[in-house]
Amino acid sequence: MSRDVKLALVGLPGSGKSTIGRQLAQRLGVPFLDSDAEIEARLGTSIRAYFEQHGEAAFRDIEAQVLQELCERDAFVLATGGGAVLREANRRTLKQACTVVYLRASVDDLWRRLRHDTKRPLLQVPDAQARLRQLHAERAPLYEEIADIAVDTGRPSARAVTRIIAMQVELADQGTDAAPPTDS
């Protein structure tokens, strides 16, 4: 396994980016990076609090800067924020610097995982399930646009998804074309 692997995980909130990212980084022997955690460390406050004080546009500016910096590192697995793909510059940065892995999940699966969440600012609305449907409709085409690998995270365990991604990365690393996106 090459030590210069640079993977960026994209997907909606609750798709498993942080959980799978940590497992994948450990399996591949590279650092795990979480853009939201990096942003919160830089801001000295939660993303939710920053959103409430400064708005989404100001947050997206900081997110773009942090993504650019993180993608300049040598080897990593990066869990991106769910909305990182909204800016074309971010999509371009991720696509040029990384192998992009789209963690696909249905709205029903996401709702099951997130229905009690109080941390994600975009879901703090009266009808969070409808908001998830809207986010899915807006963002899924953007995730698909930049994905090198797409894996469904609805039913398989995080460990199984990690294994699927690692196998595809390892095949690509050996000079073999990665298997087509899987719908496990």
Image (tube, rainbow, N blue to C red):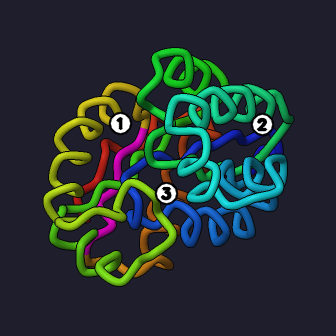
Q: Which residue occupies 36% across, 64% down? A: 124
Alpha-carbon span between mark 2 and mark 1: 19 Å
Mostly what secondary structure, the magenta segment?
A: strand
Say few, some or many: other residues with alpha carbon within 10 Å of mark 3 (under 14 / 14 to 19 / 20 or more). Answer: many
What is the secondary structure assignment of the residue under circle 3?
helix
Residue located farthest toward the front when viewing the structure as drawn: 53
Residues 136 and 6: in front is 136
Kindly identify which numbered label has been placed on residue 70: 2
Disc on the earlier residue, 1 or 3: 1
Residue 166 position in % (x across, y down): 56, 59
Disc on the earlier residue, 2 or 3: 2
Amino acid beneath label 1: Tyr
Amino acid beneath label 2: Leu
Q: Which residue occupies 64% across, 35% down? A: 63
Q: Which residue occupies 26% across, 40% down? A: 140
Residue at which label 3 appears: 165
Disc on the earlier residue, 2 or 1: 2
What is the secondary structure assignment of the residue under circle 1?
helix
* Stretch of the chain drawn in magenta: 149-154
Residue 27 position in % (x across, y down): 70, 68
Residue 46 position in % (x across, y down): 67, 61
Alpha-carbon span between mark 1 and mark 3: 16 Å
Q: Which residue occupies 31% across, 46% down? A: 181
Amino acid beneath label 3: Ile
Q: Is residue 153 magenta?
A: yes
